[in-house]
Amino acid sequence: MSSRVDRGGLPLSTSSDAAAAFYREGVDLGLSGWPGAAGAFDQALALDPDFALALAARARAYLIAADYAKARAMIVEAEAAVLTKGTERERSHVEALARSVRGNSAGALEQVLAHLELWPRDAYILALPLGAFGLFAFSGMSGHPQAGVDLCERMATHYGDDWWFLTYLGWAHTENMNLAHGRAITERGFALRPSSAHGLHALAHALFEDGSVAEADALITGWLPDYDRSGILHGHISWHLALTALEAGDGDRALKTYLEAVRPSVSQALPINTVTDGAALLWRLSAYGQAAPAPLWEELSQFADSAFPNPGLAFVEAHMALIAAATGNQDMMEARLATLSARMTDGTYPAGPALQAIWHGVSAFAQGDYSVCARSMAPMAGEVERIGGSHAQRTVFEDTLLLAQVKAGEMAAARSLLEARLSRRPSIRDRQWLATKASAASR
């Protein structure tokens, strides 16, 4: 068999065996979340400047790094190259990535699903819909966790014990609350490539969701020192470490982790992670009784304003709501909410009314209007998954609703929500809340 093939054995239109090898290396590094993918693609292009799939992969690497101008310029080069030197499969591959780079998420998802029907072994394209920030999660659809499971199960016969595929098959089941099954599959994938940051991340989610807080803490604590801070998931995995501390009731350790690895001034994470992880962690600290110092909120607010000056992804906007509420930035709240409301009215915003409920709810919570918060958020609680992200990330909004119900004296509603949560996943904190707060509903 030719060595000019991708990781799935699909032919590559390059005359250089070495360029193909660098491309495969870059894809595996990217799929594992390990540093070096962009450099590997650069080395492939140094050997073959017209290597269309390497150009497209480099464009995606720029997109992931939030260098949008370079991503758009590079994808144009890929499109030109694939027309003169590319197969039908490669043209379809580049088209899927081009739509993604240009922000046409709906078109990208359509292209991806059509592409996979013909070339299911094209892992770099299969990766696009999957994960907390994938095309499914950010589509605005209800039931995207099930969509991830359905797609992965259709693809399973084509991948066998591929470490990357097992990671995302396990992830999909975990996010769909098939916890024991998801964890077992994720553990198999991680064992095959223990250096995979995405594998570690998926396993951290599985352990969080099944209540194995001590295991998650030990896993992350032992693994993270070998992962360079430039790694795409370093800040977010540190966020998971802080989350395990909060689950164990150790707010001081959670704040220490934020200061050392998550805050904007120290983290090398992508802007979307810095803003959303930072906002969710500081908000949880305050909500759980550990005051987050005001200067930390101000630092995060300044970074967020710079990184996301205009309303965009629903997941980001939900966390911008936390920042605006915590800092009392009414101007930001009104301006962003007005733009989002207009987009929802004209049908150009896919996430639906859940985002508006979050904005109104967290604003009311920050002002101590807990009844208003509960009235705003409770009707939309079942729709929050439409903003995207993972279940663990979205829990901050459910926590806000729960605490608002408790503080508003709506103990029956709070008890019902707590019991529903505990039926899904064990939680030290939820058991404590059920015993000390919501138990008043039975009196």
Image: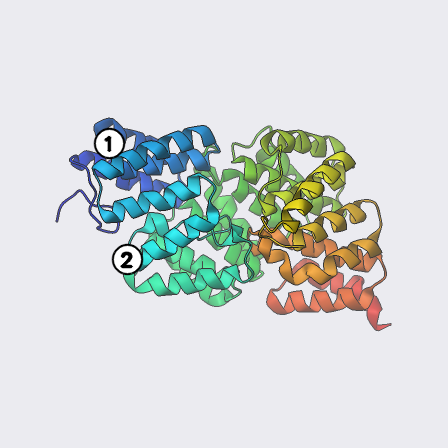
Q: What crowding class fits label 1: few (fewer than 14 Cα within 10 Å), some (14-19), or many (20 or more)?
A: many
x 54%, y 42%: residue: 236
Dividing the image into 4 quarters, which one contains the C terminus? bottom right
Question: In the structure shown, which secondary structural element does the residue marked by tag 2 occupy?
Answer: helix
Alpha-carbon distance for marks 2 and 1?
25 Å
The three-letter amino acid code for the residue at tag 1 is Asp
Task: Quadrant for residue 255, please give it.
Answer: top right
Q: Is residue 22 above or below residue 211?
A: above
361 horizontally vs 73: left or right: right
Labelled pair 2, 1 in contact (Cβ < 8 Å): no
Q: Nearer the viewer, residue 157 or 161?
A: 157
Q: What crowding class fits label 2: few (fewer than 14 Cα within 10 Å), some (14-19), or many (20 or more)?
A: few
Point out residue 424 in the picture as x, y percentages from the top left corner.
Answer: 60, 67
Give me the disc on residue 124: none
Point out residue 351 in the picture as x, y percentages from the top left corner.
Answer: 60, 53
Q: Is residue 424 above or below residue 29?
A: below
Task: Quadrant for residue 166, please give it.
Answer: bottom left
**Looking at the image, can residue 52 be seen?**
yes
Point out residue 240 in the picture as x, y percentages from the top left corner.
Answer: 56, 47
Q: Nearer the viewer, residue 200 or 396?
A: 396
Q: Which residue is mark 1?
A: 50
Q: Residue furthest bottom?
A: 442
274 horizontally vs 52: left or right: right
Q: Nearer the viewer, residue 436 or 282?
A: 282
The three-letter amino acid code for the residue at tag 2 is Leu
Q: Is residue 61 above or below residue 367?
A: above
Q: Residue furthest front?
A: 346
Q: Nearer the viewer, residue 391 or 432?
A: 391
209 horizontally vs 130: left or right: right
Q: Which residue is mark 2?
A: 118
Visual colour scheme? rainbow
